[in-house]
């Protein structure tokens, strides 16, 4: 093989390898056996290669929903926990930016975190639906965390949902559903442009944040007003800039200089005020 071809091949291999996200955190399936609605679907998860706007990792083709477990040190644990639903337009999940990196930030705050890989309604060839299989995965994740709360040092009455972008839509659906309702909810720049459902008066306290220069989160303000109308306790933050998809660490250097970088700190204050930590 010619040296030039060899270098190109090695570079391509390195690039492909970099698209596969690896974590040291343990993962568990959320459904015993086959997830309802995934019968006969055995293809493995697939990592998006090339064409992504940043260095973060995106996984798709999920048929075996799972939770990746991130626990704070026992000395810092508050008993509070979040199931985290990363975003990705229901096509894929940005599993590190809106998953592991957020989980580690929560662990620093003494909060347990469980990153969900849910089934995706808009993945190529998908037969899943946001309001059915994707929502069912969120609800089952909450059940799993509550059922194993003692093992993980979690208070079963302090299990919340945190969703980003499309995951924020799932968080909104979960907090308005009667079954397996979370104890509190956080919606990060949620994809609620087409939200048409009535907000339940039984929805839990909700924390929402968006950036003013994010054209994809225009429905968040309307959702906040709907929560208020339903007399649901809610806190809503609009930061001047930051765009869409910032997670807890941002996509690029300089994020820490933006107001939106303070949302975890504000979340901590909100949770303390509610007696959740």
Image (cartoon, grey):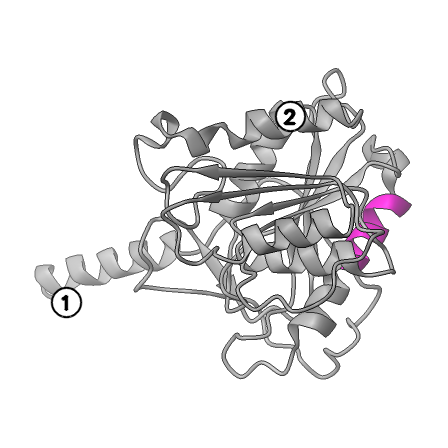
Image location of residue 199, percent across then percent down:
75, 59
Quarter location, residue 172: bottom right
Question: Is 184 on the left or on the right of 15, as rendered?
Answer: right
Q: Residue furthest front?
A: 229
Q: Residue at x 70, y 22 (%)?
A: 73
Q: Residue at x 51, y 49 (%)?
A: 189
> How many C-alpha atoms fall within 10 Å of the one at disc 2: few (<14), some, or many (≥20)?
some
Depth check: 121 or 170 in front? 170
For the residue labelled by badge 2, is the local secondary structure a helix, a strand or a loop? helix
Question: Is 91 on the left or on the right of 215, as rendered?
Answer: right
N-terminal of the pair, mark 2 or mark 1, is 1
- The mark found on residue 268 in the picture is 2
Callouts 2 and 1 close, C-beta under 8 Å: no
Image location of residue 103, percent across then percent down:
60, 37
Q: Is residue 44 above or below residue 274?
A: below
In the rendered image, the quadrant that contains the N terminus is: bottom left
Front tag of 2 and 1: 2
Magenta-colored segment: predominant secondary structure:
helix
Q: CA distance from mark 2 to mark 1?
A: 57 Å
> How many C-alpha atoms fall within 10 Å of the one at disc 1: few (<14), some, or many (≥20)?
few
In the rendered image, the quadrant that contains the C terminus is: top right
- The mark found on residue 1 in the picture is 1
Image location of residue 272, percent across then percent down:
73, 22
For the residue labelled by badge 1, is the local secondary structure a helix, a strand or a loop? loop
Q: Residue at x 82, y 45 (%)?
A: 145
Q: How many marks?
A: 2
Q: Which residues are magenta?
A: 138-147
Depth check: 241 or 6 in front? 241
């Amino acid at each position: 093989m010619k040296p030039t071809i060899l270098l190109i091949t090695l570079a391509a291999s390195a690039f492909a390898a970099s698209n596969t996200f690896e974590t040291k955190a343990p993962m568990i399936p959320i459904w015993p056996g086959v997830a309802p609605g995934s019968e006969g679907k055995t293809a493995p998860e697939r990592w998006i290669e090339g064409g992504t706007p940043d260095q973060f990792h995106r996984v798709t083709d999920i048929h075996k929903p799972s939770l990746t477990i991130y626990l704070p040190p026992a000395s810092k644990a508050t008993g509070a926990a979040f199931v985290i639903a990363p975003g990705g337009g229901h096509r894929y999940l940005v599993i590190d930016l809106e998953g592991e990196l957020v989980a580690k930030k929560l662990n620093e705050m003494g909060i347990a975190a469980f990153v969900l890989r849910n089934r995706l309604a808009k993945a190529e060839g998908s037969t899943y639906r946001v309001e059915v299989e994707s929502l069912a995965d969120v609800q089952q994740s909450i059940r799993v965390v509550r059922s194993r709360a003692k093992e993980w040092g979690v208070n079963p009455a302090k299990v919340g949902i945190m969703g980003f972008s499309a995951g924020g839509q799932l968080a909104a659906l979960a907090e308005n559903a009667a079954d397996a309702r979370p104890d509190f909810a956080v919606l990060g720049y949620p994809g609620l442009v087409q939200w048409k459902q009535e907000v339940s008066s039984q929805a839990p306290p909700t924390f929402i944040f968006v950036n003013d220069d994010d054209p994809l989160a225009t429905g968040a303000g309307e959702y906040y007003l709907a929560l208020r109308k339903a007399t649901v306790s809610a806190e809503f933050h609009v930061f001047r800039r930051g765009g869409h998809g910032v997670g807890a660490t941002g996509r690029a250097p300089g994020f820490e200089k933006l107001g939106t970088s303070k949302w975890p700190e504000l979340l901590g204050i909100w949770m303390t005020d509610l007696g959740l930590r």
